[in-house]
Amino acid sequence: MSDAPDETAETDGTDGRPRPSDVGSSDGPPIEDKPYKIIFEANKCFGAGKCAEVSDNWEMDLQTSLARPNSYFIGEDDLEDNVRAAEICPAKKDQGCIHVIDRRTDEEIAPDPHGDGTLSVDW
């Protein structure tokens, strides 16, 4: 079982953006155990490493010089540092390429540049 994302998501039909629940692996752990999901736009990462400085879930891949999450599904205990990683990511003109999604509400909680919980991926 891999929790790596599948970037071939359907759009939600309202604004052309994919629904967070449709992005990535559909075989993640139960929502009760890991209510948050990381969506990572690896193609936008340029390896600043700020995420790895603030979160144990993130590390720098020495072969690619890019960041990589250890897990795409996280619980409450890992939420704060992953939100911080999403907020300080300088990619995409400071909108970040790390997105923390609440699987219960299907809303982006970080970085949420639109301010409305819609997924801010740039695919």
Image (spheres, rainbow, N blue to C red):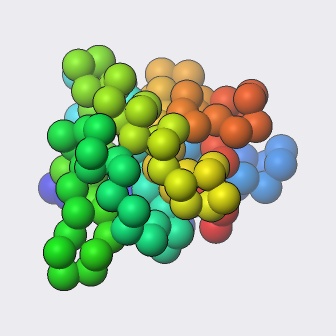
Q: Pick the residue in front: 51 or 102.
A: 51
Q: Position of residue 99 (x, y in %)?
A: 50, 44
Q: Position of residue 107 (x, y in %)?
A: 59, 30
Which quadrant, please, contains the N terminus?
Answer: bottom left
Residue found at x 72% / y 47%: 12
Q: Position of residue 98 (x, y in %)?
A: 47, 49
Measured along the vertical axis of the image, is residue 6 above or below residue 113?
below
Q: Position of residue 92 (x, y in %)?
A: 62, 61
Q: Do we see residue 87 in this rendering?
A: yes
Residue located farthest toward the bottom when viewing the structure as drawn: 63
Which quadrant, please, contains the C terminus?
Answer: bottom right
Residue found at x 27% / y 80%: 64
Residue found at x 23% / y 19%: 77
Measured along the vertical axis of the image, is residue 39 above or below residue 63?
above
User: In terms of image quadrants, where is residue 28?
Assistant: top left
Q: Pick the residue in front: 116 or 53.
A: 53
Q: Is residue 62 left or right of residue 97?
A: left
User: In terms of image quadrants, where is residue 119?
Assistant: top right
User: In terms of image quadrants, where is residue 114?
Assistant: top right
Q: Do we see residue 7 in this rendering?
A: no
Q: Pick the residue in front: 66 or 5.
A: 66
Residue located farthest toward the right when viewing the structure as drawn: 14
Residue found at x 44% / y 56%: 40
